Image: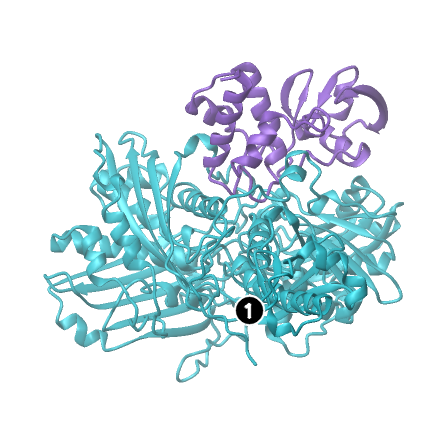
Amino acid sequence: MSVKISTTVNGDKVDFVCDADETLLDVLRNRLGLTGAKEGCGTGDCGACSVTVDGRLVCSCLVLGAEVEGRKVGTIEGMANGDKLHPLQKKFIEHAALQCGICTPGFLIAAGDLLKRNPNPTEEEIRFGLAGNLCRCTGYDKIVRAVQAAAKEMRGV
Amino acid sequence: MPLDTSFTGQKFKVVGTRPLRPDGVDKVTGRAKFGADYSAPGQLVGRILRSPHAHARIKKIDTSKAEKLAGVKAIVTAADLPDLTNGDKGMFDILENCMARTTAFYDGHAVAAVAAIDARTAREALKLIKVDYEILPHVTDVDEAVKPSAPVLHKNMFTEGMEPKPKKASNIAKRTEFGHGDVGAGFKEADVVVSRSFKTEQTHQGYIEPHACVASVGPDGQGELWVCTQGHFVYRNTCAQLLGMEVSKLRVTSSEIGGGFGGKTHVWAEPVALALSRKANRPVKLVMTRDEVFRASGPTSATSIDVKIGARKDGTIVAAEATLRYSGGPYYGMWAELGAMTAFACYDLKNVKTVGYEVLVNRPKTAAYRAPSAPMAAFAVESAIDELAHKIGMDAVDFRIRNAAKQGTKSSYGPVYGPIGIGPTLEAAKHHPHMKAPLKKNQGRGMACGFWFNFGGQTCTDLNIGVDGTVNLAVGTVDVGGSRASLGLVAAEELGIPYESVRVVVADTSSLGHNDMTDGSRGTFSSSMATVFSARNAIKILRERAAKMWEIPVDDVVWEDGHAKAKGEGRGNLAPLSLKEIAAAAGTTGGPIAGHNEIVADGAGVSFATHICDVEVDPETGATKVMRYTVIQDAGKAVHPTYVEGQYQGGAAQGIGWALNEEYIYGKDGRLQNAGFLDYRIPVCSDLPFIDTQILEIPNPNHPYGVRGVGETSIVPPLAAIANAVSNAVGVRMIHVPMSPPRILKAIQGDKIGR
């Protein structure tokens, strides 16, 4: 069964038709051409598909496309402001917080959500705040440092 | 004339700096295209049916119902992948692993595949394929598999490397032996001997990106393959052979790669995707699920290792031996052999002997995993070394320093070492503040050493100079962790131009000559060597062009700081010509300017590391927390130190997961019980501390810049370093990895509880 959905993605009004049992991740990747969210597991364990729905951090592999009717979806493609990178994006590059980069979009979305809720997190709060996102390359060292640096810049100190 | 690859000791201007990586913006904006991010016009969705049985004869496969399902465009079984391997056993094993023929050898072994118009139809079609299995007895444990009573996987498997050749088939594919001296005589000189058996469980590389490809083959015999791989040239050669295609007709493009760690050095589903595409005459996208990645793409070996080391009271090791049994899945691989080669490579030993046994089991085909086979051998050896030091009453670091290999040492696996870093990493550890930091209750400190060979191999790069004097560098090794930045630095260094003026791309297989697999930590080592010579070839042409522009002999033109400079008397009036000026004039001085290099990059310098680790063990739960971790490793020359640090940290983190949590768990039915990231738990951010790094630079004499590979050695010491730390914390020697809470509890409390 197909359903017709009207929603907002990264501030743009979007209509799409999807199967009733199709995940938001599949809709974003296969119907809307937004391949920044990645499928690492399909079971909500890796966080590579992280997006926000009405400002709330979710694994888009655990949300149905049909559920975003009338909502606001935020993905990595909407993180930069035009040609101006978000401070997190900038600090991830500067601190080499990525090696292969497959987990990076998910980390950035999750870190953005974390800093919105807690602009001045301790190292421990960052580590627990990002514990839902798996990275296999970096050992998280440089990711934590990049988030710390971005938080500092965003607080204007 | 062969190129002189010797280390020259030149002073660097940009090599060793830390510029931003060229693929950074793409990767933080979601723009970078990984394996599953590409789509071809008219593409179908491919899916694979896998055996639910650990060992079963395939009596019949009935695809008739699935073929009739609307939207199904092709179904492939082994019948569509005829054996074209011409007696090449290794190639046949790859073919059979991609698609079972008469027998399914493990839970997850592919038996059929479908291409359909969408994922839903493909899934439905798989359910309609009926496979008639005859279930056979199975064996999944490495120690069980070598018992005479074990079911034998291959009736024609007679252990290689045995004299006389065995008459009875077994699950031991090969025996290998390394060493020198007389260990029997050596042990007689020993005052203290430690002898123990160790086990390590099977782990997966755990790359976050599942295997993914888009295959397209037409009736004209031409094909395209977009794939996440560590070696698109090798994938091309393998796929072309298995499919009966001409190598040049198959163009393979490597996508951005979402982690590999050795697991993407082997083809898994790519030949199947190509076969589906050929049959449907449409592009086919095939992406593995995480469950498939665990069940059907290569984990590392499970091992069982016996170690015996003897020393005199003064701390000199007099003899060392080890017997290593490594599981290979259902097919032969040189896994125990690599373990046997690396086990004692850190030490200067008069009498040493190692024996490796390749053991076949009903598990997925073993694949390379970062310094393959070395971490398990190091776990066993470095644990025994620690125990020996304690028994003699020597400090663990001092004991290792006393016995460490050095320049001129005959290694335990044969070659004589040149300048190496084991001694310096140990000295650095001895003096590191980490060693003196106080420990609290229930905490323990451990350290361990590690070795990896590093590889070189066939390599080829193209360096093209644009009309504006900026530079494109095309390389054939895959960028798994920032190597485009490193290679850009090398090109900039040679040419004397800013890093920002070089753009590095990974070229597809039709645009560049053959390159070997990006494995063995060879990416930056070998491609930087080829880049140096490509740049020098381009400089030769730049000098010729400048000579032409000035109308002077080329021998009077030197290349300095990105400029051609005229030397000699009366040339003072000739202002230096920049790369930009020479490039702008290229059209009138002889055409485009480029440099190429094709080389077998020999002489990869061996690599050593020493790790220090503090843990805290909860005596009530057996849970272990890593409190502090330090990696000290020789890089030869760190081209981009930030990404070298990243390799050190990443390898340590993978080792920590292996040491404490990660393992394949099989049920009695031979099925994998934890094929997902929830139950196969890799370290998350809150599991780890910051990982400190110290880069040592002992130049590799066989590379112009002194570069050694840096990617793999960092995963070798952690299993042992953590085991030594836990052993020191709880007062019991840990002999089984991973040291999960139940195992630690069992070790602390004997057999009273736990499993």
The image position of residue B498, as x and y in percent, is: 60, 49
Examine the rendering and report whether any part of residue B206 can be seen. Answer: yes
The image position of residue B440, as x and y in percent, is: 22, 30
Circle 1 sits in a helix, a strand or a loop, which is it?
A: strand
| Residue B505 horizontal side relative to residue B715, left or right | right
Subunit bearing disc 1: B
Examine the rendering and report whether any part of residue B472 can be seen. Answer: no
Residue at the image position 73 percent from the left and 66 percent from the top: B549
Compared to residue B508, the image places residue A122 above or below, namely: above
Compared to residue B605, the image places residue B504 above or below, namely: above
Name the residue nearer the viewer: B64 or B594.
B594
The image position of residue B482, as x and y in percent, is: 56, 48
Name the residue nearer the viewer: B213 or A45.
B213
| Residue B733 horizontal side relative to residue A55, left or right | left
Image quadrant in which the C terminus of chain B is located: top left
Amino acid type at circle 1 is Gly
| Residue B304 horizontal side relative to residue B57, left or right | left
Image quadrant in which the N terminus of chain B is located: bottom right
The colour one sees for chain B in the rendered image is cyan
Neighbours of disc 1 within 10 Å: few (<14), some (14-19), many (20+): many
The colour one sees for chain A in the rendered image is purple
The quadrant holding residue B576 is: bottom right
Residue furthest to the bottom: B164
| Scheme by which the image is coloured | by chain
Residue linked to disc 1: B457
The quadrant holding residue B351 is: bottom left
The image position of residue B548, as x and y in percent, is: 72, 69
Residue at the image position 39 percent from the left and 83 percent from the top: B163
